Image (tube, rainbow, N blue to C red):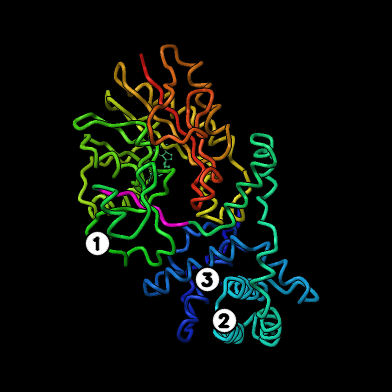
Amino acid sequence: MRRTRPDRTARPAAPAPGGAAARQAALRLLTLVLAERRLLSDAAPVLAPLDPPDRARAQRLATDTLRGLARADALLAPLVERRPPMPVLNILRLGAVELAHGAAAHGVVNDLVGIAGRGKRTAGARGLVNAVLRRLSPDAEARWADLPAPRLPKWLRGPLVRAWGAETVAAMEAVHAMPPPLDLTARGDPAVLAHSLGGTLLPTGSVRLDGAGQVSALPGYDAGDWWVQDAAAALPVRLLDPRPGERVLDLCAAPGGKTMQLAATGAEVTALDLSDERLGRLRENLARTRLPAEVVVADALTWEGGPFDAILLDAPCSATGTIRRHPDLPFARSGEGLGDLIGLQARMIDRALALLGPGGRLVFCTCSLLPEEGEAQVRAAVERHEGVRAEPPEGAWIDARWSSPEGGLRVLPHHWAGRGGIDGFYMARLRRA
Ligand SMILES: C[S@@+](CC[C@H](N)C(=O)[O-])C[C@H]1O[C@@H](n2cnc3c(N)ncnc32)[C@H](O)[C@@H]1O
């Protein structure tokens, strides 16, 4: 029988003075990912007691630490004789990352020594935390800059090197190591939004902000003028190119970033997803942005409806293209279940094609770096379905590096390294005869 893991995230946070609350929560997040192998998206109970600025800070501290874990361990290795137990090690890692990012040493060290002192399993290591972090602080920034970018885990690195080559994978790892900028999609004119927020308008129409801080505190959030969406995630809807009044199905819709893009074009949108819980977030997003869509809780494989003029299939996948925004993924995942996902994606493509009217178009996309979840799916679908072809994309917004021989677009994180990177994505537009 499978043992259920104790849900340590549900424990109420012990009181922590002042700015220590965010650091203490960040340490709980590290335990969740590194000890319990869970994703940060499961972290709501840890973050719920915090006010929004501390919540944003705790998330940033945890993601910075996970993104730089190998570098933090390399900084700490010469200063600790034996590897300390995980709760102590995580305190040191968090401190090392903060010091390497230029945080004031006295605040970091005092807070983390205090946190160590309040923990049952860490109280005995107060002196160690104090001594190691004080020794580390003078040259942490300089030493950090000399360390190589952390490598992807073996289960992912091997297949990626086979697919894209070692040099490309190293370039992707360098981008994964950088804190990503915040990308927004505008409900209205993106140039106006970029101007009002002091952001950069990207060639694809997304607005990019550096060092944005707490998202819900940015102007226009409550009014629903924009939503957070990586520049790559905004491309599949551009490729589908919906028109006002067209019947469009968003087949795996939640939490709704692409549904909002579809609805903003004036198309008649049906947003379907298997998860009622995730659709709750989609409904909140639609309410905030005041965009309309019919919401359906159903299994895409069995749902009857249509025919539709256009369908977006943003299929469940390994999400390996999102590692720069979700550095927890390589620690919480092992590649297990990938074969099942690939089979599900193929069945979903077949079902989506059956829901299209004659001449209709399907955009299939995944936020994966693996060709098995992208290029190979499209090649196989075209072979399986007579009268279905991939339409090579056209448009001034398309970066020449993205064109893929089977007719899709392959976006890799290093493609926009000079601009702050972009998530990995694959997308292709299939047309039914
Ligand atoms: C990549 S996410 C979609 C992200 C969404 N398109 C967006 O832009 O916000 C994949 C979604 O597929 C849904 N899903 C998984 N299996 C499904 C199925 N059999 N039928 C419908 N939805 C499914 C998941 O619940 C998840 O919300």
The residue at 70%/85% (across/down) is 131
Name the mark on residue 108.
Answer: 2
Circle 1 crowding by C-alpha within 10 Å: few under 14, some 14–19, many from 20: few
Q: Quadrant of the C terminus?
A: top left
Q: Secondary structure at mark 3?
A: helix
Instruction: Between label 1 and label 3, give the one nearer the viewer.
Output: 1
| Residue depicted at 41% across the width and 23% down the height | 430
Q: Position of residue 298 (x, y in %)?
A: 34, 38
Residue type of the residue flagged with mark 2: Val
Main SS class of the magenta portion in the image: strand
Tag 3 residue = 26
- Tell me the magenta residue range: 181-187
Marks 3 and 2: which is nearer the front? 2
Front-most of residues 107 and 11: 107
Magenta stretch: includes residue 182: yes
Relative to 324, is 147 above or below?
below
Q: CA distance from mark 3 to mark 2?
A: 13 Å
Spatial CA distance of label 1 from label 2 is 33 Å
Q: Secondary structure under badge 2? A: helix
In-image side of 85 versus 356 (left or right): right
Residue 418 vs 387, above or below: the answer is below
Where residue 362 appears, as percent x and y from the top left, is 37, 26
Q: Mark 3: which amino acid?
A: Ala
> How many marks can you see?
3
Q: Is residue 261 left or right of residue 380?
A: left
Q: Spot the residue most to the right.
A: 81
Q: Nearer the viewer, residue 191 or 405?
A: 191
Q: Label 1 sits on what residue type?
A: Asp
